[in-house]
Amino acid sequence: MWKYFVKRLLWMVVIMLCVTVVIFTITYFTPGDPARIIMGTSATETEVAAKRAQMGLDKPFLVQMAAYFKSVYLHGDFGVSWASNNNVLDTLLSRLPVTILIGGIGMLIQVIIGIPLGVMAAVNQGKWQDYLSISLSMLLVSLPDFWVALMLVVVFAVRLGWVPVSGIDNWRCFILPIIAVAISGIASNARQTRSSMLEVFRADFVTTARAKGQKENVVIWKHMFPNAVMPVITMVIGGLGRVVGGSSIIESIFSIPGIGLYLLNGINNRDYPVIRGSTVVLSLFSAAAVLLMDLVYAMIDPRIKAQYASGKKG
């Protein structure tokens, strides 16, 4: 089992290195001169050149990338923001709990509502419960996240005044962002759960369980659901990386001081240390979610256990 873990962990390291190469390359070859943007149009060429040298932008591409890799992966230093002059890593760590809190609670709501909704639709296939679940899922999954967030602000914050429009001054400020994060995931989880349950609905072991006189709830939750849960696990755990990684829009609309808004501000200001650092951290969450998903597979799927127990390669 430990071989499986080590292999997946090594793949996670490779993914992180590749992401760092890609984001560094994109920011390096993006048109425009960050030094000129910072200094303004009134600065002379000599002043801009001096600023460029101070920022390390006068060095060749490979030299800059090697220095960045050394700084990040050997010293844990993501650099200093060009716009605010604050340490990027310290800022990311201070904003990280907010992003995780909103994404984590949003994902929990997705699971609590979406999975039972999908199970209800599957066991009542062709009935009104099924049609209601399918219709609701199609409606929710088709709504863009930014539109949902804006409508929540207009209705519940501006018109009704039940919750604050933005900020994180108290717990009520988190209600609308969490709902906005959860809505599309509820639909996705419900559809995936329904599909997975229908695949095992008429399996032999289900027929045998019913023939033995077991109650329908026991058949559903003890026999059907555990055998249909693998695709659902993929959807749920993979959704954690998507929720955290896609936090920019939600945090921007609600002015939530998280990593997503920090990244968006960095893009607007052409603040490369912020862009690179935020992308690396968000990618780390996505890679960690994939690693967690693989480990859950290894614990649940006996075929993976048998494969590594017999010394075969994965």
Image: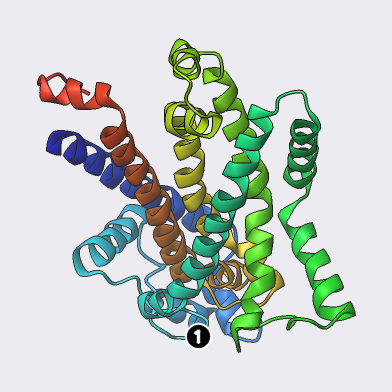
* Position above or below: 86 against 76: below
Residue 186 x/y as whole percent: 64, 48
Name the image quarter holding the N terminus: top left
Front one among 222 and 182: 222
The answer to whether residue 308 is visible is yes
Q: Is residue 232 left or right of residue 138?
A: left
User: Could you tell me which quadrant the C terminus lies in?
Assistant: top left
Q: Nearer the viewer, residue 168 or 191?
A: 191
Q: Position of residue 143 (x, y in %)?
A: 78, 49
Q: From the viewer's perspective, is 88 left or right of 113?
A: left
Tell me the SS state at disc 1: loop
Please, what is the three-letter code of the amino acid marked with disc 1? Ser
Eyeballing the image, is 275 above or below 185? Answer: below
Residue 21 in view, yes or no? no
Which residue is found at the position 58% from the left and 62% from the top?
A: 247
Q: Residue at x 45, y 39 (%)?
A: 233
Q: Quadrant of residue 310?
A: top left
Q: Residue at x 40, y 76 (%)?
A: 88
Number of marks present in the image shown: 1
Residue underneath mark 1: 84
Percent coordinates x, y for residue 277 in the rendering:
41, 65
Instruction: Using the rendered view, name the quadrant where residue 139 is placed.
Output: top right
- Residue 77: which quarter of the image? bottom left
Going by the image, does 310 lie left or right of 13? left
The one of 231 and 273 positioned closer to us in this rendering:
231
Which one is nearer the viewer's eye here, 298 or 8? 298
Identity of the residue drawn at 46% across and 59% down: 279
Say above or below: 215 vs 265.
Answer: above
